[in-house]
Image (cartoon, grey):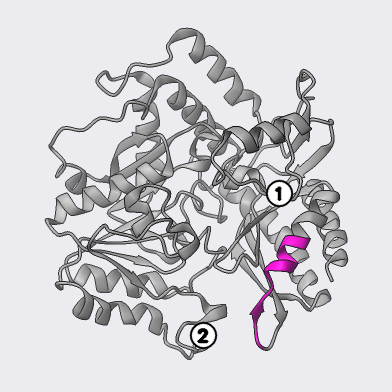
Amino acid sequence: MNPKTAAPKAPVPATAPAATPHVDATAVRAKHKEFLFPCVANYYQEPIVITRGQGSHVFDADDRDYLDFFGGILTLGIGHCHPDVTKRLQEQVARLVHTSTLYPTQEIVNVAEKLARLTPGKLKKSFFTASGTEADDTAVVLAKIYTGQQEVIVLRHGYSGRSHLAMSLQGHAPWRLIPTSVAGVKHALSPYCYRCPLGLTYPSCEVKCAQDIDELIRTETNGKPAAFMAEPIQGVGGFITPPKEYFQIAVGIVRKYGGVFICDEVQTGFGRTGDHWCGIEHWGVEPEIMTFAKSIANGMSVGATIATDVVANAWTGLTISTFGGTPVTMAGCDATLDVMERENTPKRAAERGKQLRAHLDSFQSKYAFIGDVRGMGLMQALELVENRKTKEPAPKKAAALMEAAKKQGLLIGKGGLYGNVLRIAPSMLISKEEIDEGAKRLDRALSEVK
C-alpha cells in the first residue's frame, strides 16, 4: 500500500505510564545548576522536572499532568513512549547493542531502504550519525567533496546545530557563541515575509529575497558555490515559512552556478508539515542531499544524511561514526518509521494541523499582541508584538505566555531571533480532542498576558 495514500487507522491507545520512584524536584534543579554547564538552559523560571510520559502527555516529579504541544523540540513525532517503539528497543537491547559502522546489520539496512523509499526524487544512499548537527556537517562535507568547491550559501535566521561548522552556518547571533572562523559561508536573505528584509510585500515583491542569491554568488563568492543549504521551514528562526515560489527560484540559481541543494529536514521531516513525507515537497524541488534527525527515531539519537547515488558515490575516503547507525538506535528508528507509515503521519498532521490553525487564527483576532500566525501542518507559530503596525517584537510577552501556559498544564516552545515566537509542534498522533483541549489551555494562558 502506498504510504502517501493509505487511509489512517486509529493510533495505538495510550496506556498509563509506569510508576516512577519519588524524585525530589527541588534537589534535581539545584544539582542541575551546580553540575551542568550554565549553557544547558531550561525553560521556565522554575524548570519542570519531567519524570515520565505517554502519548501527548508528560508528568512531573509531583505527578502533575502536562499536555505536550512541543514534543521535545519536534522530536517525539509519534508521542512519548509509543508501545511499538518501546517493545522494539527492549528486544534489541537484549540482543545486540553496538557494532560500529565497521559491520553491516539488518537494522541499519532496513532504515536506509525505508529512507530511500520515503524521500523525494533520486535520494538513495544514507550515512547515519547521532544528531542533526552531525547530519548537517556530513551534508556540507559531502557537497564540497562532490563539487570540488568550498563555499556554502545558507540563510539568515537558519539553524544547523552546535558544532564549529554549525555555528558558522548559523543565522542567529545568540547561537554563534564564538567568532565564526569556517571560511566560505555566505548568508542569503531569509524569506521572512512578516519582517521582509527588503521592506517589500508578497506577492508584489516578486520574491526578491530569492532572486538576490544570484548577486550574492556573483559578488561574495568565487562564482562556484558548493551548495545551498536551507530548512523548508526555519525552525529555531521561528517557523519562518517561505512563499510558494521561493525554493524554485533559489535552488534554480544555485544550480546554474554548479552548486547542489542540501535540504535540512531535521524539524520538517516525516509528515510534520502535512500531506507530504518531507517538507520540501510542498515547494516541488528535489534536493541532491537531505538531512534528518529529531522525529526520525522518536527520541533516539539518530541523525541521517541521504544523497543521490552520484553525489554519495563521490565520498570514497575513509570515515566512521562510532555511535551512528547502532543496532539499538536503528531498531528505534525502524519501529518509528513503521508506525508513521501505518498511521499515515502526513495525512494526520494535515488534518490536525488544519484544526490547530483554525484555533490560532481565532486567537489572532482576539488578542492584539499576536502579530503573525504561520506554519504548515503540525508546525505552527505565533509571533508576538507590542504593536501590530510597528511590529515591535514582544519577547517579554512571549516569556509571560510560556509561564502562563505552564500554569495551565500546557507545554509549548519558543524561538525566533528576538525570542518572541511561540512554537507549537505536538505529536503527529495527537487526537482531535487533545488539540481542542490544548487550544482551550492556550486561550486561557493568552488571556493572562498583559
Q: Is residue 393 magenta?
A: yes
Residue 83 place in picture, x, y as percent: 65, 24
Relative to 112, residue 101 above or below: above
Marks counted in the figure total: 2
Mark 1, residues whose alpha carbon is within 10 Å: few (<14), some, or many (≥20)? Answer: many
Relative to 13, residue 340 above or below: below
Residue at mark 1 to residue at mark 2: CA–CA distance: 30 Å
Observer able to see residue 13: no
Q: Residue at x 76, y 20 (%)?
A: 20
Question: Residue most toward the front?
Answer: 34
Q: Which residues are magenta?
A: 390-400
Q: Which residue is mark 1?
A: 69
In the structure shown, which secondary structural element does the residue marked by tag 1 occupy? loop
Q: Residue at x 64, y 48 (%)?
A: 348
Q: In the image, is 160 to the left or to the right of 217?
A: right
Front: mark 1 or 2: 1
Q: Which amino acid type is shown beneath numbered disc 2?
A: Tyr
Relative to 20, residue 399 above or below: below
Q: Which residue is mark 2?
A: 202
Q: In the image, is 38 to the left or to the right of 181?
A: right
Q: Which amino acid type is shown beneath numbered disc 1?
A: Phe
Residue 75 place in picture, x, y as percent: 56, 42
Residue 31 place in picture, x, y as percent: 66, 31
Q: Is residue 213 magenta?
A: no
In the structure shown, which secondary structural element does the residue marked by tag 2 occupy? loop
Mark 2, residues whose alpha carbon is within 10 Å: few (<14), some, or many (≥20)? Answer: few
